[in-house]
Image: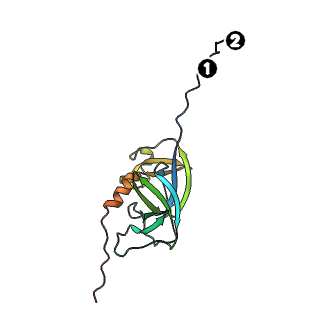
Amino acid sequence: MAETPGYVTPIAAPAAEAPPAQRACLFALAGARFAVDVRSACEVVVFDEITRFPRAPRHLVGVANLRGTVMPIVDIRALLGLPESSLARSVRTLVVRDGAVQAAVAVDTVLGLEPFESVAPIDSPAAALTRGPRPLMSGWIQWAGETLALLDVPKLLAALRTAKPTVVREASA
């Protein structure tokens, strides 16, 4: 077919593209694996110097300086129903954000960023046998043949803000 000046030969419309896969930041804590939406995960930071506070809520490990910002470092094990553990002097964290609220969540290991296709509802039959912190979740994702709890960062941070402090009673003299 000869080209006519000023006329562009039509090209077939592109096939409908599949929606891009979502991404999650995967991490391990007390032998369990969890995920957060990558849009809520800011960075991974190892803090060597932490300022601890006497009589602070149990979940508040302390605070640290992150490029001029005072960053609360929190341990979410109790919120997730996991056994407590004493944290080492150096703490690996995943900094998460909900709007202007940020916290560095103590984690054992960060497994990386992974794509996932969809989020199964919290009460889905596929995840019925899987234990998880349902009030703090937005759903379940599949990764490497395993079903992981996708944590809802706004709910998690709200739960940390409203957690009742546990005051350790000092022994009477």
Specify whether 61 is left or right of 11. Answer: left
Which label number is shown at residue 98? none
Please name the residue that numbered disc 1 is placed on: 12
Up-down relation of residue 116 to residue 80 (above or below):
above
Q: Residue 85: x percent and y percent?
A: 45, 70
Q: Residue furthest right?
A: 2
Residue projecting furthest to the left: 172
Nearest-to-viewer mark from 2 and 1: 2
The correct choice, above or below, for 167 with respect to 99 in the image is below
Give how far across and how far down residue 42 sits, in percent. Answer: 49, 54
Q: Is residue 38 left or right of residue 167?
A: right
- Quadrant in the rendering for residue 162: bottom left
- Tell me, for residue 3, which label it has, or none: 2
* Image vertical order of residue 19 relative to residue 51, above or below: above
Q: Position of residue 160 (x, y in %)?
A: 36, 60
**Image point (32%, 76%), residue name:** 168
